[in-house]
Image (cartoon, grey):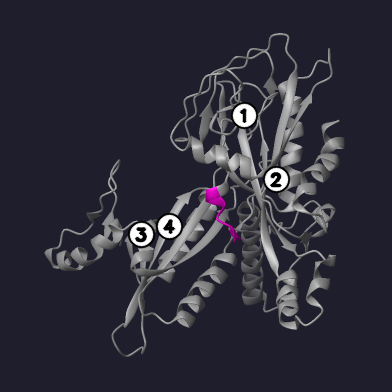
Amino acid sequence: MPVFYLPANSSIPVLSASDSTCLQFAQFWKPICLLEPSVWKKWLHTHRIGLVLQHDRPLPRHLHVPNSSGRFQVIQCRQAAAALYSLLKDWSTFVLIENHSYVKLIYGDAEKPPTSFYIIRVTSKPPCVVINVAFLSGTPGYLRYKTVQQLKDHIAQLTFPQRPSAKEPSVRKVTCVKFRSTAYKSHQQQRQEQLQQQPKQQPQQLSPTQQPPRKWSDVNCCVLLQKPIEKILIRYERMPSDFGTVVFPDGTTPLAPGSQTKSRTAGGGLLTTLSRYLHHRRWVWAAQSGADVEEEAIARVLATITKMRLQEGFSFAHSTAGIINMVLEVQMKGETDCDAKRFEDGMDECHLEYEKWKNSLRPCVIQYVMFPPHTTSSNSKESGSEGDGTDEVEALEEGDGELQIITECWIEPQHGLVVNCPPERDYMELLPYYKLADVEHKKRKDCYA
């Protein structure tokens, strides 16, 4: 049972138990619940674990196009989140706040009282999750790093069973039918052995019309990331009104001569700065003039691209109003160039340091954004809500405008070349970051056509 709980629309923890004997215990831990991870570094040794939760399967039907009521479905990660919180609950000694804060006591000797403890705080905006781990001052470094690594290993091993599609029978249903048939046959054979005292007969095999239970593979719950993706994640909260000009995710545009300054929402300056930092490309694909192309056909193209991205290792990081952001972290290695020659004469130490740096692997984050089918003549207003797993937008006015597919690629600038690519994305192998978007564009050309 958690020590505290958070009431609705409140950030002040409330004691769960009414027993007066728990008051002293609660008074000690309540300030820790109120302490924000941003200020932990002043008093504690902090470590960060970043990850992206695996999405629930199958994917929502109205992920790329709205339903009849004009609402989009958003990506849900309930199964992965439940597995993660269950692991943290079992890992910790006790729970301060459910799905929020945990405490693990550290014992120097199993037969003696604990000598220290550490705190686990989950900051989640699924699918992106950040786990902050804080140790008391004086905790040995080797113990801290060992503990964090063990926790990472357990998180990386989390799995949940893949859910079959609606067209196929579930594993549980088929398995139950087989077990029931086998049990009944065994019971009949035992009665015959008892009555007739005959040798035990071999169980009959399944007939060709009877299908054996299908085994479904498990899916990893989380994808661990080295980079703080939550700080550089591109989040479009609404559909840009014009895709022909540069529009930053917060809705602002570069000021033209003589134009007035646009009002910015809170945090807009940060998003604009981020947009200028990341290397990015935008592609606008228009349906053929005069062709009778429906949004459902465009949605099928987007669904195909989504499946291709998932096969390549991308993960869902954000979704709202039909706008999907998928992320992938690739490994990059220093490229061989002529700069090493300047270390040859009398600078062996520097040369060794350079070689060590060149051979080290550095992560690079790639973000791929897909917009829902867009009609150029529409002047729609959007209003989103993620409370029930859907986003609502006003219906597009078809008019005489053309239907478009809009995608973007945002890449973190990183020195070196991409290495260790699996076969699904071997087209990225040994490419610098600024060539990845163009190569991806050429690879998707046939799919758009």
- Amino acid type indicated by mark 1: Val
- Amino acid type indicated by mark 4: Val
Vertical order, 53 against 318 (above or below):
below
Q: Which residues are magenta?
A: 222-231
Image position, residue 291 (x, y; %) = 83, 15
Which residue in the structure is indicated by mark 3?
Answer: 39
Q: Within 10 Å of the Cα at label 2, are there few (<14), some (14-19), or many (20+) other Cα atoms?
A: few
Which residue in the structure is indicated by mark 1?
Answer: 247
Callout 2 secondary element: loop
- Amino acid type indicated by mark 2: Glu
Which residue in the structure is indicated by mark 2?
Answer: 168
Say whether disc 4 or disc 3 marks the residue closer to the N-terminus: 3
- Amino acid type indicated by mark 3: Val
Of residues 201 and 51, the one drawn nearer to the viewer in this rendering = 51
Image position, residue 329 (x, y; %) = 67, 56
Say whether disc 1 or disc 4 marks the residue closer to the N-terminus: 4
Which residue in the structure is indicated by mark 4?
Answer: 122
Per the model, the C-alpha gap separating discs 1 and 4 is 33 Å
